[in-house]
Amino acid sequence: MDTWSRRKFLTTSGVAGGVALAGGATAWGVNEWLATGSSSGGDSDASTLVLVTLYGGNDGLNTLVPAADPHYRDLRGALAYEEDEVLPLGEGLGLNPGMKGLKKLWDDKRLAVLRGVSYPKPDHSHFRSMAIWQTASPTGPVPSGWLGRWLDHEGGGDPLKAVSVGATLPPLMAGETTAGAAVRLGGKKLPDAWRRACTELAHVDEDAHPLLRRAGTSLAELTKVSAAFDGNAKTDREDPNEPRDEDEGNEGASAGGQGELGAQLDVVARAIEAGVSTRAYSVSLGGFDTHANEKATQSRLLGQLDKDLTAFLERVRRTEAGRKVVVAVYSEFGRRPKANANQGTDHGTAGPVFVLGDPVRGGFYGDQPSLTDLTDDDLRVTTDFRDVYATLLQGVLDTEPGKVLDGHDTTLAFL
């Protein structure tokens, strides 16, 4: 079976339902994941990166709360948390009350808190700021994302090395020569007859042509992933790209993010458990543009983030591959230190980045921005976001950071 025949077989079977995206990327249903994917399977020694984007500009000061600082209460008024409300981490800082799972990870030294993270000369625009974060280019626009460039250098032309869960591919996974793949939630069950056919066709002699062996291995992987994903009600959950009803209580604007983070992470967990060869995943949660009535909205969103992330990590760490997973959580910018007149906060600059997982060296990294030394009423940047990316590239994706980050290779010690 040559490559063309294999593609024809899968397409006529109704299994290969990929949808072409801009830039050569492809969107697949969950059960179609490996229909045209890599045939090497997962590397048991490889680490996996899960990147979580909080769209809208998460308020860092009410996430990592300087509750012991009187200037914080002066600036925030009714939006401020009291010291006895937050989950204490030390140095006068505490996590938002809704983040009890992350507090346990901190106590277990599996949570790194990177403080004051942003890029030089921050911009208050959602579009511009997110473009900078996703391309890792603070000085000017570039046509590729930082994980896309990683694919260019290390992915071997395989788009399934980097996968976004959702109907669209974020710019961060678009390279100059290779683009990642988008995997839609849901997907059709592989019919029993085709499952049997795939199983039979997967048996290929060792001395067969390399393309035939690759086709056979891919078919074997397809049946394995289909068996792992079929019959699971969670694959039929709401697509996170669908807009949520107003009565669901999401008062913060999305600014491009998705809902149903748990459903996205469920897909990632099942892929890791199935031994998929993907090394980097992108998921997202929207709703953090909290210009009004922030406290309740952000608390609910952070509670969802906390619940979904901790459940995901506890699930995947039951496997060897899952114990090598590193999760990084960021937003395009923080919020201004001073509350506005609508019990919310406006677009700001620096904020915390969280890195979670068994390989992580827990603790604080970078300095906490001062509330008395502001720049144009904004927090000063104390940690360059490229230092975070360089550390993830080197410590998780086994790549020289300078290749991807235009020579930037300064790393932090959280891995």
Image: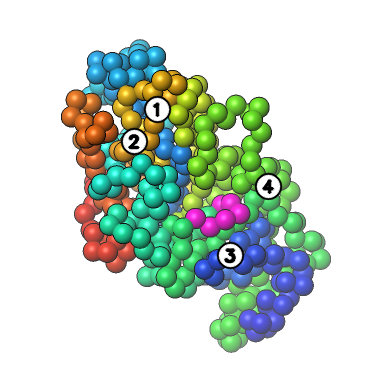
Lower sequence index among marks 2 and 3: 3
Query: What amino acid is at disc 2?
Result: Gly
- Residue placed under numbered mark 3 in the picture: 21
- Magenta segment, which residues? 165-170
Please provide percent x and percent y for residue 309: 49, 38
350 versus 84 height, above or below: below
Q: Give the residue drawn at x 64%, y 37%.
A: 244
The alpha-carbon separation of the residues under discs 3 and 4 comes to 22 Å
- Residue placed under numbered mark 2 in the picture: 348
> How was this image coloured?
rainbow
- Residue placed under numbered mark 1 in the picture: 345
- Residue placed under numbered mark 4 in the picture: 235
350 versus 142 height, above or below: above
Q: Quadrant of the N terminus?
A: bottom right
Query: What amino acid is at disc 3?
Result: Leu
- Contact (Cβ within 8 Å) of mark 1 with mark 2: yes
The residue carrying pointer 2 sits among few (fewer than 14), some (14 to 19) or many (20 or more) residues within 10 Å by Cα, namely: many
Taking the image as drawn, is residue 44 in sight? no
Lower sequence index among marks 3 and 1: 3
Please provide percent x and percent y for residue 142: 36, 63
Taking the image as drawn, is residue 229 in sight? yes
Lower sequence index among marks 3 and 4: 3
The chief SS type of the magenta part is loop
The residue carrying pointer 3 sits among few (fewer than 14), some (14 to 19) or many (20 or more) residues within 10 Å by Cα, namely: some
